[in-house]
Image: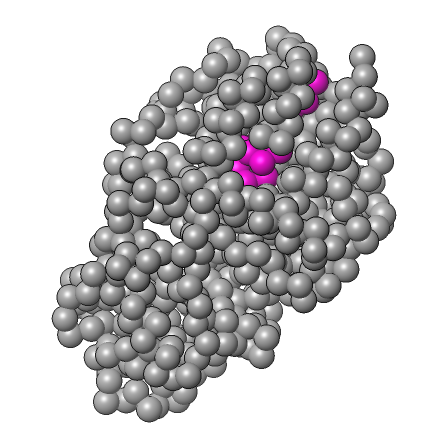
Amino acid sequence: MRELDYDVVIIGSGAGGGAVAKELAPLAAAGKRIAVLEWGPKLADDAFTGREVEMARQLYFDSGGVLTKDRTLTMAYGRAYGGSTVVYTGTSLTIPEDVVKRWDVPGIEYNDLQRRSAKYIEENNVHKLEESELNDNNRLFLEGCIKLGYRAQQFPINVKGCRSSSLCNLGCPNGAKQGTHRVQLPAAEAAGVEVITNCRVTRVGERSCDAVVADPGFGLPSSWESGEVRVNAKVIVVCGGAINSAALLLRSGYGDRLPTLGRYLTLHPALILVGEHPHEISNFHGHPKSFYCDEFWESEKFLLETCMYFPFITSKNLIGFGAEHSKLMRAFGRLQMILVLAVDPALESNRVLVDRDGEPVIDYTMGPSVLDSLHRSMVASAKIFFAAGAHRVHAPAGASFFIERKDADRVEELIPRSNVIPGKISVASAHIMGGCGMGREASDSVTDSWGRVHGSPGLYVGDSGLFPRASEINPYVTVMALADRVAEHIRDNAGELLAP
């Protein structure tokens, strides 16, 4: 095993890792050696083909279908230069003040997170699309919400030069999405930070980490040769995403003194619903996610969002098979789609474990409150579809495959709560949070409010694993705000942390 020496190592290059790298770039410019170790590949611009299966295999863990232990829920998170910022839709919301109060972490204040969030909102060109850039799927959602008196708002998104490909979840083929792969990482590299792709970190210690560099068979080659490597560093920042960060620390032995490591995982369990219109709607161009409805956020703990998913993802979220399933998929060009996000509680029992090989196992159960939220969200979505003009709706827990327009006033009856059964409905998640939560001390948390791992002065966490409970909104900007805090602490204490 060859050995390399650095001052700072950042594990992961997504929203957290990219933000930390960019904020530590002045140290690199001053001569400190800083490396970002990214498990996934870096793709050339012309490699973003928009082909669903190909892009899913190259940009996601397990092609976007990581399963929980009980196989009732799938999770999608990225593995690439830029992490999940390459494959998410760019929605950029600031965490609500009430959520920060519910977090109840000493040192974490709403005004501070708001200020840091505003910095990245500006840096990443976050703005609302002009009305002319909205497609039918988004207009219909807004129209349905307005007719029903539901509160709907427009998402601010981080794009520049968007050409309306609608391929956000497969990696933008036009370089428009301003994720860390377009903004923070290039800025960090320009100042001297090294980004090493195809490099999986297998174990992390107080002052070193072990990694394996391997060519996945696609993407640009890594700047390091293949093989095992030990990287010595004075500071290590773990930003591998909630699941991989917790798993890395667990297989490295930190669970022995950090009892909450891997626990209090939250996921925003999600459903995709479709309503079929009698005419074609523009769903294959335009930004796929421009509006959300938070009418039921406080009362029933769910959000509704516009979305557009591709044939494979859509088909797996429909219930059943055979003639009805085929008929609905053949109407793909007439489908309006809504994404449901349930706000789940942070439970100690929902957690990341590791198996005998050190691989992550997600032990997560959807409790009654989450299933209630999913049920009510299906009813609300069906009403929006019909209000927007759909002539039939497919709800995962429907008493029949289709709910016809003539039965629009019976959706409460035709989507029974008793049909909301884990494993019988297709539930997914892309917002994975917790497992390395911030808090007061080692008995109740993994890190302090600066992301420092309790009892390990040079070891930090800088991703969504820091969330002590759900963000209750799309978490991207909040991850960057917390990562900004981590980087600030390292910069302010560089004299001590990076001393020879």
Answer left or right for 79 relative to 485: left
Whether the magenta-drawn stretch holds residue 186 is answered as: no
Q: Name above or below for residue 93 compared with residue 242.
A: below
Across and down, in percent, residue 377 comes to 45, 75
Answer left or right for 190 relative to 134: right
Across and down, in percent, residue 31 comes to 66, 13
Q: Residue at x 48, y 42 (%)?
A: 124
Across and down, in percent, residue 168 comes to 35, 47
Answer left or right for 419 relative to 346: left
Q: Name above or below for residue 432 compared with residue 489.
A: below
Q: Quadrant of residue 61?
A: top left
Residues 299 and 285: in front is 285
Q: Name above or below for residue 431 compared with residue 498.
A: below
Q: Can residue 127 be seen from the camera position used here? A: yes
Q: Residue at x 32, y 54 (%)?
A: 287
Q: Residue at x 47, y 14 (%)?
A: 223
Whether the magenta-drawn stretch holds residue 8 is answered as: yes
Magenta stretch? Answer: 6-20
Across and down, in percent, residue 155 comes to 44, 59
